[in-house]
Image (cartoon, rainbow, N blue to C red):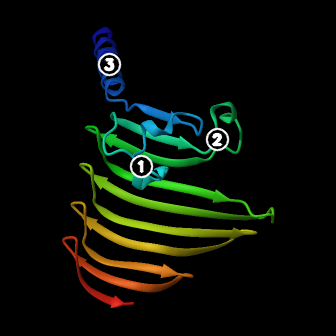
Amino acid sequence: MKYLKIIIFTFSIVFISNNVSQAQNIFKIYKDDSLELYFKERGNKNGFFFSINNLRDTLPDGKYIFYNVSKKDSLSKHKEVWIECQYVSNQKSGKFEETNYRYPKRKKAVITYKHICYYKSGEKEGIEEEYMISDYNGTKLKVFIFFGEYKKGLKDGVFIYFTDGYPSKVVLYRNGIEEKILIE
């Protein structure tokens, strides 16, 4: 019985230490932090544009959570996640999600803007979509803005662009090259 306890204790320590060594760094970034450290500059005149499309290509490994409030307001109940993403081997990896909230004057309405894309080894891989969700008194309406798919960083498949919730342009891409405009 004594040996069984020692074996279980030893196994527990090894298991816990392995999990701790594999723990992911979590970076919490607020609006009053130096956002220029995380985003690329758009150009000489335009400065910085803070969006998931403009995040730097390489950052230290870890999960990055950008909040829509300053540090002093970080305990606020209105602290919403603005951007959530992760870097593996200093490259973009996995799901990148940007969320912006709008609260019109009607107190029971919320308009949410979402932009979601996926990365693998620093390149877009999989579905990218942008849409808005209008929520009024619990009734939700999802309106797409854009939807498409990437393979190895290139547009590959059908890309649908929406105006007022209706498809306004549909384009077929193969290996990043526009093959055919299906609707314009």
- Name the spot of residue 16 as percent of width and height, x first: 36, 23
Judging from the image, what secondary structure is the residue with disc 1 in? Answer: loop
- What residue is at 68 percent from the left and 31 percent from the top? 72
Say above or below: 49 vs 156: above
**Which residue is label 3 attached to?**
8
**Which residue is label 2 attached to?**
69
- What residue is at 31 percent from the left and 48 percent from the top? 93
Visible in this render: residue 48? no
Amino acid on which the number 1 mark rests in the picture:
Asn
Q: Badge 1: few (under 14), some or many (20 or more) residues near its Cα, within 10 Å?
A: few
Q: Residue furthest bottom?
A: 183
Amino acid on which the number 3 mark rests in the picture:
Ile
Q: Nearer the viewer, mark 2 or mark 3?
A: 2
- Name the spot of residue 48 as percent of width and height, x first: 47, 48
Front residue (pair 7, 69): 69
Query: Which of disc 2 and disc 1 is earlier in sequence?
Result: 1
Separation of marks 1 and 2 at Cα, in angstroms:
27 Å
- What residue is at 33 percent from the left and 33 percent from the top? 60
Report whether 25 appears left or right of 124: right
In the picture, the disc for residue 44 is 1
